[in-house]
Structures are given as structure tokens and as C-alpha cells.
Image (tube, rainbow, N blue to C red):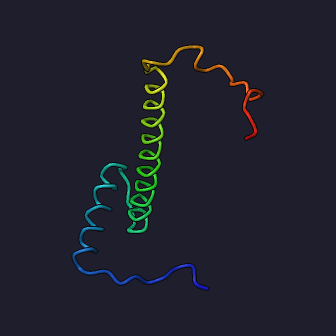
Amino acid sequence: MSKNTTMKLSKRTLKRLHKLAGEIAAEKGKRVTLEDALIELLEEKEAKKISIETSITKDDREAFKALLDLKFTGGCPEDYKEYNYEDVGTG
């Protein structure tokens, strides 16, 4: 199997990819191939996905902590005692 492959791209997409490669080259100060530009896009997408997942987890954790701090009226310490089932009749 070959290490390289061919991709069909529209002229518009190829132009955008060249533009991106140029921007990356300007940032890095060295030549960048189209493959480098694609790899950068893929890595950026993966990093964004991880960031979103982390953010959601953090938000969920904060919401749970807020629920734990809520005070509810009507409940007293004796409401939380275990019930004695020995006095329940069998029928």
C-alpha cells in the first residue's frame, strides 16, 4: 500500500487550503505543506472537542455542588432516621 494518496478538492477548497497554509507559514516563519495545514486543522478540531468536553464536565460539577448547598424546608433530622419495620403487620 502506498504511503501517499490523492484527494479530489474543488478549486475553492484548494484555494482556501493554500491560504491557510500561507497563514500558518507566516506564523511559524517557515514553509508549510498542504498536509501540514490539514494536520493543524485536525489537531485544532481535536483540541476544541477536548476543551468543550472539559468545560461541560466542569459546568456539571459546579451545578452539582450548587445543588448540594441548597437548603430544603420541611425536612428535619428525625425524617432521616431509619424506619423500624418490626411493627409492620403481615396482613
Q: Which of 30 and 77 is in front in this view?
A: 77
* Location of residue 56 in the rendering, given as x and y in whole percent from the top left corner: 43, 42
**In the image, is residue 3 above or below residue 41?**
below
Number of numbered discs overlaid on the protein picture = 0
8 relative to 76 in the view: left or right: left
**In the image, is residue 73 above or below residue 60?**
above
Q: Which residue is painted at 45% across and 37% down in the image?
A: 60
* Location of residue 79 in the rendering, given as x and y in whole percent from the top left corner: 58, 19
Q: Nearer the viewer, residue 64 or 33?
A: 64
* Location of residue 84 in the rendering, given as x and y in whole percent from the top left corner: 73, 24
67 relative to 29 in the view: left or right: right
The N terminus lies in quadrant: bottom right
The C terminus lies in quadrant: top right
In the rendered image, the residue lying farthest to the top is 77
Q: Which residue is painted at 23% across and 80% down in the image?
A: 11
Q: Which of 78 and 67 is in front in this view?
A: 78
Q: Which of 86 and 32 is in front in this view?
A: 86
14 relative to 6 in the view: left or right: left
In the rendered image, the residue lying farthest to the front is 91
Q: Quadrant of residue 13?
A: bottom left
Q: Which residue is painted at 72% across and 31% down in the image?
A: 88
65 relative to 87 in the view: left or right: left
**In the image, is residue 38 above or below residue 30?**
below
In the rendered image, the residue lying farthest to the left is 12
**In the image, is residue 3 above or below residue 84?**
below
